């Protein structure tokens, strides 16, 4: 049995990227042994005062990793030389509290271990801890990422899933990033927490397919659609109006997101499509019936996502501040 596990581990290592293979759960054991406790203390405090932080960090992490890899390029602010990734149209609505959690953790770590822990690692640890705080599974996070030297808004377009993508487009996007259909469905379970702005699903609840104003997507539960129409009535005047992704347990990381999809309670068109397409429906049904299966597959997918496109060695830096390159002219 032990030899079999060793073979599996060696095969997995062979297929891992050279950079990912350099990461380790004990990377800071000698240089900053308290790193995980410091991050946990900071994000716990932040989550208690601002309960939307957890869902925000999960979204932030995904958006960072899917554009050029998990390298904290999304944390960089626009400067006189460059319009950064976070100001791209697909990222403009990312919540400030998630950014703030990372900044606070970085500040605390710079006092304890100056110039040692990367912002990319802080975001990875914080996301894992916040998922656990919301009731989700704990998964392993290997460390040793470096922070990117570049961050451009122009690099974002076409690299992130959008609510109105077809299933073919979504599957293609995830496959380009080496994720299977099942991993895509498992990662979509992140929508069990957080919210979406009305503009992201307005076409489903108002004038669907060019019909009259009150016509909604027939895939939606009628009562749910009517409730959304009332909640979003003034979304054009107030674009900040939003609805919870999981109407049943919006603040808890569980499998109700999948159960909701099978009941016509999926908020986004891309969510509803998961429960309708034959390539994804069986996975939705599995996770709706078995939370343990969802947690296991989500954990594996997050471990894989967390090492996607990482930078190591001279291909990155340890930023002194997460929002600014060490070389300001970058």
Image (cartoon, rainbow, N blue to C red):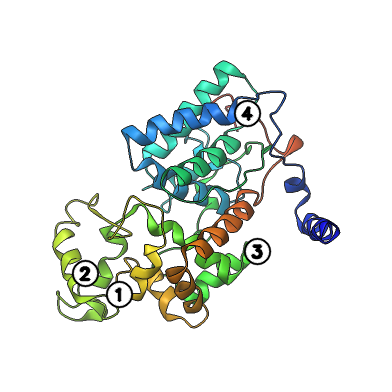
Mark 2 and mark 1 lie on one chain; the one further toward the N terminus is 2
Residues tagged 2 and 1 counted as in contact (Cβ below 8 A)? yes
Residues tagged 4 and 1 counted as in contact (Cβ below 8 A)? no
Residue 220, image x, y percentages: 27, 75
Residues tagged 3 and 2 counted as in contact (Cβ below 8 A)? no
Q: Is residue 207 left or right of residue 307?
A: left
* Residue at which label 3 appears: 178
The residue lying at 51 percent from left, 61 percent from top is: 292
Comparing 33 with 108, the one in front is 33
* Residue at which label 2 appears: 224
Residue 180, image x, y percentages: 61, 69
> What's the distance in space between the residues labelled 3 and 1, CA to CA?
30 Å
Comparing 261 with 158, the one in front is 261
The residue lying at 72 percent from left, 41 percent from top is: 23
Q: Is residue 14 left or right of residue 234?
A: right
SS at badge 3? loop
């Amino acid at each position: 049995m032990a030899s079999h596990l060793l073979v599996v581990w060696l095969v997995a290592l062979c297929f891992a990227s050279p950079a990912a293979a350099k990461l380790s759960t004990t990377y800071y054991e000698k240089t900053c042994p308290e790193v995980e406790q410091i991050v946990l203390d900071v994000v716990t405090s932040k989550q208690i005062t601002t309960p939307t932080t957890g869902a925000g960090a999960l979204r932030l992490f995904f958006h960072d990793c899917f554009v050029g890899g998990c390298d904290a390029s999304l944390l960089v602010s626009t400067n006189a030389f460059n319009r950064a990734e976070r100001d791209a149209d697909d990222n403009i609505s990312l919540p400030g509290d998630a950014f703030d959690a990372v900044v606070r953790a970085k500040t605390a770590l710079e006092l304890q271990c100056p110039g040692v822990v990367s912002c990319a690692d802080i975001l990875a640890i914080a996301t894992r801890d916040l998922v656990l705080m919301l009731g989700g599974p704990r998964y392993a996070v290997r460390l040793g990422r470096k922070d990117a030297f570049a961050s451009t808004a122009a690099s974002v377009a076409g690299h992130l899933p959008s609510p109105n993508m077809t299933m073919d487009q979504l599957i293609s996007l995830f496959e380009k990033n080496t994720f299977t259909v099942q991993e895509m469905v498992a990662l979509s379970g992140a929508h069990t927490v957080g919210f979406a702005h009305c503009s992201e699903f307005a076409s489903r609840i108002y004038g669907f397919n060019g019909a009259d104003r009150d016509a909604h997507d027939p895939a939606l539960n009628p009562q749910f659609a009517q409730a959304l129409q009332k909640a979003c009535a003034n979304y054009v005047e107030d674009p900040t109006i939003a609805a919870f992704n999981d109407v049943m347990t919006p603040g808890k990381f569980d499998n109700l997101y999948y159960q909701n999809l099978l009941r016509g309670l999926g908020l986004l068109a891309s969510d509803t499509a998961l429960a309708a397409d034959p390539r994804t429906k069986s996975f939705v049904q599995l996770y709706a019936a078995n939370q343990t299966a969802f947690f296991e597959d989500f954990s594996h997918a997050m471990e894989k996502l967390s090492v996607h496109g990482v930078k190591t060695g001279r291909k990155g830096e340890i930023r002194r501040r997460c929002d600014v390159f060490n070389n300001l002219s970058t």
